[in-house]
Amino acid sequence: MGGISNRMKEVKRRRHRRKKLVKFQSKLKKATTSEKLAMAAKLRKMTTGCDRLIATMGLEERKR
């Protein structure tokens, strides 16, 4: 049998995403506006639930 099952691959991806989110949240405190936009772009590429995460973290673009 060998190899890794699809379930374990997904679990590994989730854990990695969670670690990345913790890093983003720690960097968020000191981030400039351009860095926040870059973080939002990375989040969009990383996960499908990015809209809710971006709103929660306050990375939304300000429309004025």
Image (cartoon, rainbow, N blue to C red):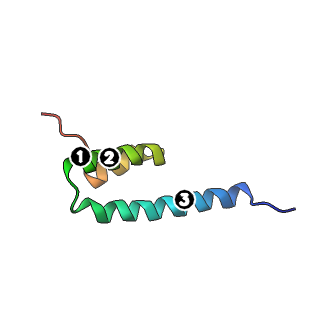
Q: Is 49 left, or right, of 39 in this rendering?
A: right
- Residue at the image point whose x is 29% and y is 54% from the top: 57
Asked if disc 2 and disc 1 are in contact, CB closer than 8 Å, the reply is yes
- Residue at the image point whose x is 35% and y is 59% from the top: 24
What amino acid type is highlighted by mark number 2? Ala
* Sequence-earlier tag: 3 or 1: 3
What amino acid type is highlighted by mark number 3? Arg
User: Residue 49 location in percent, x, y?
Assistant: 44, 46
Residue 6 badge: none
Q: Quadrant of the N terminus?
A: bottom right
What amino acid type is highlighted by mark number 1? Ser
Q: Nearer the viewer, residue 8 or 39?
A: 39
Give SS at disc 2.
helix
Q: CA distance from mark 2 to mark 1?
A: 6 Å
Please name the residue that numbered disc 3 is placed on.
14
Asked if disc 3 and disc 1 are in contact, CB closer than 8 Å, the reply is no
Please name the residue that numbered disc 1 is placed on.
34
